[in-house]
Image (cartoon, grey):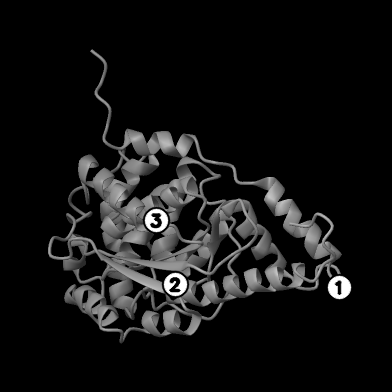
């Protein structure tokens, strides 16, 4: 009898058959920029961003409806004292955003971005990855599916961030499993850890790698064993955005680590994603280099909750408006 399908096999199928984007739409944007009354290439990355928007939306660059999705999860591994913050800080962050008092709220106001914060069973932390798999296959698949629903209402651009005490350690564990190295190669201060706590984080990552040794070959198995609910939901949101022709802006270390799982399964999986910034977390710098991503900003930020990505979304909106305003001034001879 054939082995039954894993709950994650549908996700694997999606990863094998990703839309390639609209190369003609991208070419039209680049051709139009070349015809504008300005020095060639003088707008730098603004031109690249407008062309990227066109390729992955399949239409002229537009960024009027930008959706910020923040995924919040708690982790059993936090019990090892790997963060200066208590796990209750995750819920507090969600509540602050709901009340309009978080940093992300102010940036969304500044750039006219819509905001949704997703509470991923904060009262039920994942299992301790230093002892067991964070999620079973069914739970991981269900959380990926939940993340896909973040793109249910059509947006021009999806901005992805996260909240979760201890998730920089989880991100480090994911990176070590996907790309090699020890915990010390990937951990950092996170939300303010000192040297003793950073050493503890490295030890916990090494312990998790040892516990799951031999079972970290498939990227989605890496995700369910060493990740968390916000990581799985982010992976789902990225996949759904690709299927629905919605370009994505990624935030910091945790969001990029979740995206790295998809990249490990299919190196084209992040082609529709723009990396907002490089955070102050050392592991994020290393991960960005491994993925070959080119961050838009470098502001020394490591706040999380999508703040860096929201700032980058302002640049994306500016790129779209720059293109649409300047293309409108071109002679109307078949330009689109």
Q: Nearer the viewer, residue 26 or 307?
A: 26
Query: Which of the two residues, 275 or 167, is positioned nearer the viewer here?
Result: 275
Q: Earlier in the sequence, mark 2 or mark 3?
A: 3
Q: State yes or no: discs 2 and 3 in contact (Cβ < 8 Å).
A: no
Q: CA distance from mark 2 to mark 3?
A: 28 Å
Of 172 and 95, which appears nearest the observer?
95
Q: Which residue is labeled 3 in the image?
A: 151
Disc 2 marks which residue?
281
How many residues crowd around disc 2 within 10 Å: few (fewer than 14), some, or many (20 or more)?
many
**Residue depth check, mark 2 versus mark 3: number of the one nearer the observer:** 3
Image point (38%, 49%), residue name: 177
| Farthest top residue in view | 1
Q: Are marks 3 and 1 in contact (CB under 8 Å)?
A: no
Q: Secondary structure at mark 2?
A: loop
Q: Which mark is residue 37?
A: 1
Q: Is residue 190 left or right of residue 87?
A: right
Tell me, yes or no, if residue 61 can be seen here.
Answer: yes
Q: For the point 73% across and 58% down, which residue is it?
A: 29
Choose the circle earlier in sequence order: 1 or 2.
1
Please tell me how crowded label 3 is: few (under 14), some (14-19), or many (20+) other residues with Cα within 10 Å.
many
Relative to residue 171, is residue 278 drawn left or right?
Answer: right
Say if mark 1 contacts mark 2, CB within 8 Å.
no
Q: Position of residue 2 (x, y in %)?
A: 26, 16
Compare marks 3 and 1 and give the one earlier in the sequence: 1
């Amino acid at each position: 009898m054939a082995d039954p399908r894993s709950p994650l096999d549908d996700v694997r199928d999606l990863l094998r058959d990703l839309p390639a984007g609209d190369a003609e739409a991208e070419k039209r944007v680049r051709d139009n920029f070349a015809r504008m009354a300005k020095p060639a290439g003088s707008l730098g990355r603004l031109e690249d961003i407008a062309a990227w928007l066109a390729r992955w939306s399949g239409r002229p660059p537009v960024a009027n409806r930008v959706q910020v999705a923040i995924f919040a999860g708690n982790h059993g591994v936090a019990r090892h004292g790997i963060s200066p913050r208590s796990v209750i800080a995750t819920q507090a962050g969600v509540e602050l955003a709901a009340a309009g008092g978080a940093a992300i709220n102010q940036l969304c106001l500044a750039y006219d971005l819509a905001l949704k914060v997703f509470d991923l069973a904060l009262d039920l932390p994942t299992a301790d990855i230093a002892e067991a798999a964070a999620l079973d296959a069914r739970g991981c698949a269900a959380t990926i599916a939940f993340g896909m629903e973040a793109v249910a209402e059509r947006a021009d651009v999806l901005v992805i961030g996260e909240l979760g005490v201890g998730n920089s350690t989880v991100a480090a564990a994911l990176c070590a499993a996907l790309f090699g190295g020890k915990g010390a190669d990937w951990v950092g201060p996170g939300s303010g850890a000192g040297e003793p706590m950073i050493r503890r984080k490295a030890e916990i990552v090494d312990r998790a790698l040892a516990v799951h040794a031999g079972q970290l070959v498939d990227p989605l198995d890496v995700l369910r064993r060493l990740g968390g609910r916000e990581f799985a939901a982010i992976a789902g949101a990225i996949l759904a955005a690709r299927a629905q022709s919605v370009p994505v802006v990624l935030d910091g270390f945790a969001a990029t680590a979740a995206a790295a799982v998809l990249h490990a399964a299919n190196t084209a999986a992040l082609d529709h994603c723009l990396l907002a910034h490089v955070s102050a977390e050392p592991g994020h710098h290393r991960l960005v280099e491994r993925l070959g991503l080119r961050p838009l900003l470098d502001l020394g930020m490591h706040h999380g909750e999508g703040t860096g990505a929201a700032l980058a979304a302002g640049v994306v909106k500016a790129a779209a408006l720059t293109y649409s305003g300047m293309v409108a001034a071109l002679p109307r001879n078949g330009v689109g």
